[in-house]
Image: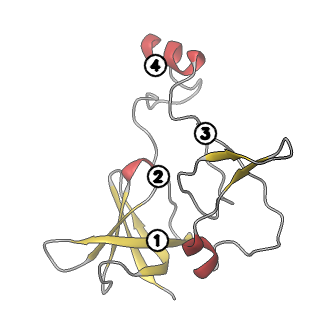
Amino acid sequence: MEISDKLLCLFNAEVTAEDDDTYTVEVPRREIDTGSVEAGEVYRVALVSRERTDAESSTASSGGSRSGSSRPSSEPQPPVDIGEMRYVEVEDIGKQGDGIARVERGYVIIVPGAEIGERVKVEVTEVKSNFAVGEIID
């Protein structure tokens, strides 16, 4: 699955039924507080299932890869690029005292100088296959 470079935030939410044949997906307050999204604005919303679709299952079982790509699809690409700005929440502190944040698929962004629980805006300065380094901007 491709994830747009325009992705502002990513969170799990329940779809709840309203009284008038409409449904609601609640946005966590932290996304408003950090400026990822603004109340009253209109956004495109993508809903991603927690389970694999039949098409994904058959591709995975056949070992298919993207045409023209020398790298098999079983090796996902890092979900960030050098120079990309991201809002991240620091979940842990690494052995060397740097903040650890996780984004899509559990991919790690190391944030030097950050503390557990901080939500910061970072600029990605280094990207490796299993982690990236981000410098605090805000």
Could you say whether the residue bearing mark 1 is in a helix, strand or loop? strand
Residue type indicated by callout 4: Ala
Residue type indicated by callout 1: Val
Distance Cα–Cα, label 1 vs label 3: 20 Å
Give the residue pinned by disc 3.
48
Q: Give the numbered dot on residue 138.
A: none
Label 2 environment density (alpha carbons within 10 Å; few <14, some 14–19, many ≥20): few
The number of discs equals 4
Distance Cα–Cα, label 4 vs label 2: 19 Å
- Going from N to C along the chain, the mark reached first, 4 or 2, is 4
Give the residue pinned by disc 1.
88
Q: Residue drawn 30% across and 82% down? A: 112
Could you say whether the residue bearing mark 4 is in a helix, strand or loop? helix
Residue type indicated by callout 2: Glu
Residue type indicated by callout 3: Val
Distance Cα–Cα, label 3 vs label 2: 12 Å
Distance Cα–Cα, label 1 vs label 2: 11 Å
Distance Cα–Cα, label 4 vs label 3: 18 Å
Q: Give the numbered dot on residue 104.
A: 2
Give the residue pinned by disc 4.
60
- Tell me if 48 is positioned left or right of 6 in this view: left
On screen, residue 73 above or below 97: above
User: What's the image's color scheme?
Assistant: secondary structure
Percent position of residue 105, x then y: 42, 47
Report the residue that reaches farthest toward the left.
Answer: 95
Q: Looking at the image, is mark 3 or mark 2 nearer the viewer?
A: 3
Percent position of residue 114, x then y: 33, 84
Could you say whether the residue bearing mark 2 is in a helix, strand or loop? helix
- Going from N to C along the chain, the mark reached first, 3 or 2, is 3
Q: Residue drawn 79% across and 60% down? A: 43
